[in-house]
Image (spheres, helix red, strand yellow):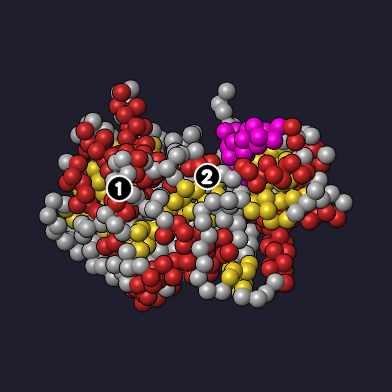
Amino acid sequence: MASTLAELEEMQREAAKGASRASGGMREVTYRDALREAITEEMDKNPNVLLLGEDIGAYGGSYVVTRGFQEKYGRKRVIDTPIAELGIVGVAVGAAMAGLKPIVELMTINFSLLAIDQIVNHAAKIHYMFGGQFTAPLVIRTASGWGQLGATHSQTFEGWYAHVPGLRVVMPSTPRDAKGFLKAAVQGNDPVMFIEHSLIYRNRGLIPDGEYILPLEGAEVRKEGSDVTIVSWSRGAILAMGAADELEREGISSEVIDMRVLRPLDIDTVAKSVAKTNRLVIVEESWRTMGLGAEIAAAVQEVAFDDLDAPIGRVGSIEVPMPYARNLERIIIPGKDEVIQAVKATL
Amino acid sequence: MTSVGSGGTATIPGIRAEAPDAATSNLDLDHGQLRAMFELMLLARALDERTWLLNRAGRVSFAISGQGHEGAQAGLGYAFDTSKDWLHPYYRDLTLVLHWGMTPRDVMLMNLSRKGDPNSGGRQMPGHYGSRRLRIVSSSSPVATQIAQAPGIALASKLRGEDVVTLTCVGEGGTSEGDFHEGLNWASIHRLPVVFCVQNNHYAISVPMEKQMAVRHVAERAAAYNMPGVQVDGTDALAVYRAAREAVARARRGDGPTLLETVVYRFTPHSSDDDDRSYRSREEVEEWKARDPLIVTRQRLQALGALTDEQEAEMQSRVKASVDDATDFALAAPLPDPEEAVTHVYAG
Ligand SMILES: Cc1ncc(C[n+]2csc(CCOP(=O)(O)OP(=O)(O)O)c2C)c(N)n1
Ligand SMILES: [Mg+2]
């Protein structure tokens, strides 16, 4: 049936094994430490970078990304805010317009809903509405995820933000992308929704030694294959890799694409892959209706209709609010088995 | 450790602090009621402690506590008529929901998310109490949303001409959210029968009160909405009872809402996911534990001649039996049926 935490941990161990095989100018770090390195490097370099969020000081953040930063950079640059998400983002928008580089931490993406007016009606549109006079280059770091957290703590909203012109939306699944993207987000001129995932902070992976930055664009082929293309992002991409491994053992070759950046979407990479595999399955943790998978499917068929030999498969959550009870939650969230079934349905 | 409300009668411009000695005089609770109030506090504490044990044993995945808040909640609860008034609680309000009629079995079914959990059938996290029958409204996890909704419940009572008061609670950190200010503003403009209680335990997870607001006392916030703001020592159930009784009377008269600030301390980490050692000293915790509301209330009752050691021993054994029963009952209950995951999305 659906995925369990044990299953996820197994996938993480697999990912770690894969990572430790490579070497040469690379080192292995956790997803969390990759984020910490990005923030540290940017704060060391640019005194305008500051951190705002609930419990980010002495406490080090709900997912312990900012531990020790208040000691190192002081209370002026690492600000424990009141519990007022709208205010936090509003202040960050103002500060960004006035030349600072705020990195906001919103504990979870669920609470970003309290700030959505500042994000959608303001941050996303400042540059446009001012005819290019002002920029609002704030970075909003927040965590998607689930795991017995109940209906209002377990939601997956990247699609809401990816809907909005003016925002850049990234959802990295690897430490390498997490660090490179976060640095690009801080150095860039646009507002960025930087969406992490509560279940992958301890994942390990290789990152290049020294400073590097990854532009906020482009999907990446994580595994080449010939029978089917599986597309996902964030924890979903890790799930897809797990499913692909299992399918491989059954003789089915999957190409796995990690979208990584959700606005702008890189449909070309998906279309190229579909030209080769002729089959596509899209995996997301959110509800499918009006979701990112729907957009990806529509955009792919526009350019690759003739390449498709089967209807596009889509895997998502069952469309209910998330229940708390563990046995119920497992039913709702898609796991490896659902991905495998969806792949087989296209063959 | 702040000394605000620590048994003294601090006079704060614009707000009133209750004098504890006044609390025992002019008290309309008889000895039986006082003992029942104390037993309620003992029960809440014991149930809460058991929940943490079950958490540490891996049976309950999440625990969030009212330990340290029992006096404030018992005092509040006794000022209401639970046969008709509404409660829109927050996650620390175990004492209040027990007073409103929830049973230890109901609570344990929720904590263990078992089939038959009357709060939500295993859908909600522990601490998200709800019962239509008991007029207890289930909260969502974003803090302070209940403060915006409570005036709506009171509006309904008022429009229907019912003699019903709504109690809603929140932590001092939650007062930073817009919901809090919008809710108080509404209630005051329309003179709605609501009692807002801020259970000020000085921290919002790790963030101390001075990072949360520039006023020294939460009760000062009432001035902005032209309603009374009353700060009271929340370790003293009787002082809270007196202050709450007045707020309820005001609401019943149609004079509108009151903001009550009960000064308390949380004895546990924020939740079972938290380690509080990074932001508060053990000395501070111990200092407050010396003023445990159970100790303070026991002393008050003894001073009034309302409680003997034998009576307390009887209470303790009843409480233990009740907590044991609830635990056994809930552990034996089955998990929710799988179909439950997809029911109740729409009312139809
Ligand atoms: C909108 C929103 N932001 C953040 C959180 C995370 N959170 C849960 S409880 C809490 C602290 C609340 O503190 P306070 O209101 O003082 O209540 P206490 O827990 O101290 O009783 C925070 C920040 C949340 N639940 N909702
Ligand atoms: Mg608090």
Sequence-earlier tag: 1 or 2: 1
Instruction: Name which residue type carries label 1.
Output: Phe
Q: Which residue is mark 1?
A: A134
- In the image, farthest residue toward the right: A251
Instruction: Name which residue type carries label 2.
Output: Pro
Few, some or many C-alpha atoms within 10 Å of disc 1 (few <14, some 14-19, many ≥20)? some
Q: Quick one: quadrant of the C terminus of chain A?
A: top right
Instruction: Tell whether position A287 is magenta.
Output: yes
Per the rendering, the mark at residue A264 is 2
Per the rendering, the mark at residue A265 is none
**Which stretch is magenta?**
A283-305
Callouts 1 and 2 in the same chain: yes
How many marks are shown on the rendered structure?
Answer: 2
Looking at the rendering, which quadrant does residue A20 occupy? Answer: bottom right
Q: Is residue B331 visible?
A: no
Gap in Å between the C-alphas at discs 1 and 2?
21 Å
**On screen, residue A217 above or below A288:** below
Q: Is residue B254 left or right of residue A193?
A: left
Looking at the rendering, which quadrant does residue B1 occupy? Answer: bottom left
- Please provide percent x and percent y for residue B208: 32, 64
Q: Nearer the viewer, residue A104 or B218?
A: A104
- Please provide percent x and percent y for residue B176: 31, 51
Looking at the rendering, which quadrant does residue A15 occupy? Answer: bottom right
Q: Nearer the viewer, residue B232 or A67?
A: A67
Q: Residue at x 36, y 32 (%)?
A: B153
Question: Mark 2, chain letter?
Answer: A
**On screen, residue A190 above or below A131:** below
